[in-house]
Image (cartoon, helix red, strand yellow):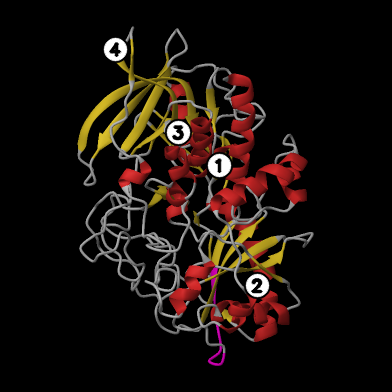
Amino acid sequence: MAAMQSAAVLGLGAVSLGRADAAERPFVPAVVVGSGYGSAATALRLGEAGVSTLVLEMGRLWDRAGEDGAIFCSMLQPDHRAMWFKARTEAPLSSLLWMDLVNRDIKPFAGVLDRVHHGDMSVYVGRGVGGGSLVNGGMAVTPRRGYFEEVLPRVDAGEMYGRFFPLANRMLGVNTVDRTWFEECESYRYARVSRGHAQRAGLRTTFVPNVYDFGYMRREERGEVPKSALSSEVIYGNNHGKRSLDRSYLPAAVGTGNVTIQSLHRVRSFRQEPDGTYVLTVERIDELGNMLGTTEIGCRWLFLGAGSMGTTELLLRARETGVLPRLDDSVGHGWGTNGNVMLGRALHSWDRTGSVQSGMPALGIDNWDDPVHPVFAEIAPLPAGLELLTSLSLAITRNPERGSFSYDPAADAARLHWSASQGKPSVEAAKALFDPINRANGTVYRHDLFGDSRAFEDRFTYHPLGGCVLGEATDDFGRVRGYRNLYVTDGSLIPGSTGVNPFVTITALAERNIDRVLSEDF
């Protein structure tokens, strides 16, 4: 598999835009803000429908190798490519034996991963053409139908599970690990150890599909191809094997001949003209963060897919500055962390997890049926290149707590309101799952992994959801209330929780929404 689609394949370049006669500004019929899961699905279907579409992405196109010959840097040797304009990496696991041995000083650059800080909560987001698909673990999980119906009761679950979830999984390139190979390979020794510990506590584990090509991974282990998942490549991008959006939806969108992607273009704000045209103010930067200029682009149809944080901020700014005063009061509410909690357990000397660990999880502990503390826990890798006798997990819990955003006019930015106490239900649920595992196996929590003495890290999320909830801030298909031809198409539509890794749900929901929008609004 090629390391990355080329710029030519992705169609990246100057887009041919028409001119709006009245304003003498560039005009394109449809603009999609962001290039993550919802945006990529939306752009593809617009292109297939013959709609000239421009995708604006604030991150870079990851298509050029660095001096080491690789496009992305390793997690063990991070450099400027790792983080979005930061002077030091900010990995979720920040210490070992309470020593700062994980993070490195780096030069500020338009790197692939960002950690956005809001007081007691930090949010990880992907930066680049492909959004979060560039930096996640690829776990492609369809949620429990009963829980999906509870979270999004106004969505036809039969249609979702019969049509749109299968469509999303097919387009994303979801595949499953070969069970025979899984049982014998070295790279999933860590997962088999954790499975055994869970079973001793009477808990059930389940195999989890992934967008990483497991066939490629098998060839990695045999030494036949360049390593990626088996070379500590996870949170700062994968050079090989992973079917991120720049290898699935986005090339297909560009291939329609109607979609163009422009990278390093940040949408700062937008407004609506009296004739209904949406006008976006767009900042252009280079990879060092230098401002190259600001331009305006007009469009008829505007799709916001900048993620839970970005989309919510754009709409809040528009409402609170009076540009779009009819936006619903619910904009900025219903935000959640998907109940994320990370934890590590110290193992016995005989429970060796291996020095080579696949960075792409393939197994989870499924305790979602627990009536008090439902949890789905990823059996996560700790690909440090040496044996650490540690089991790492990312627990997804059912946390009813929700945060909200407000607009800060002095900073011209959205502020997330989330207190440390709101993470307690998630920590309690994770503890209820892993305390019995520790008792059954004589293991203990590690208290040295997160920069202090806490065993449970609930101060960050990889799965931000909500802020523009479907059926509240929008109608039942993502149309923003109060304004025609304005849509939300990302995880901000989902009220805070999916019970599993959310990107398959975001993709399937976007497929469902754009299907209806194209049939009724175009």
Q: Going 31% across and 25% down the picture, which residue do you hit?
A: 16
Image depth: mark 3 or mark 4 in front: 4
Q: Nearer the viewer, mark 4 or mark 1?
A: 4
Separation of disc 1 and disc 3 at Cα?
13 Å
User: What residue type is disc 3 on?
Assistant: Glu
The amino acid type, in three-letter code, at marker 1 is Gly
N-term mark: 2 or 3: 3
Q: In front: 380, or 241?
A: 241
Helix, strand or loop status at disc 2: helix
Tell me if residue 124 can be seen: no
Give the residue at mark 1: 491
> Left of 267 or right of it: where is 162?
right
Range of residues picked out in magenta? 343-350
Q: Nearer the viewer, mark 2 or mark 4?
A: 4
Based on the displayed image, in which of its 4 quarters is residue 277 positioned? Answer: top left
Question: x%, y% of residue 412?
Answer: 36, 30
Give the label, 1 or 2, closer to the camera. 1
- Quarter of the image with the C terminus is top right
C-alpha span from label 1 to label 2: 29 Å
Residue at the disc numbered 2: 434
Number of numbered discs: 4
**Three-letter code for the amino acid on which mark 2 is drawn:** Phe
Q: Is 315 placed above or below 510 here?
A: above
Instruction: Rate crowding at label 4 as few (under 14), some (14 to 19) or many (20 or more) other CA atoms within 10 Å.
Output: few
What residue is pinned by disc 4?
A: 24
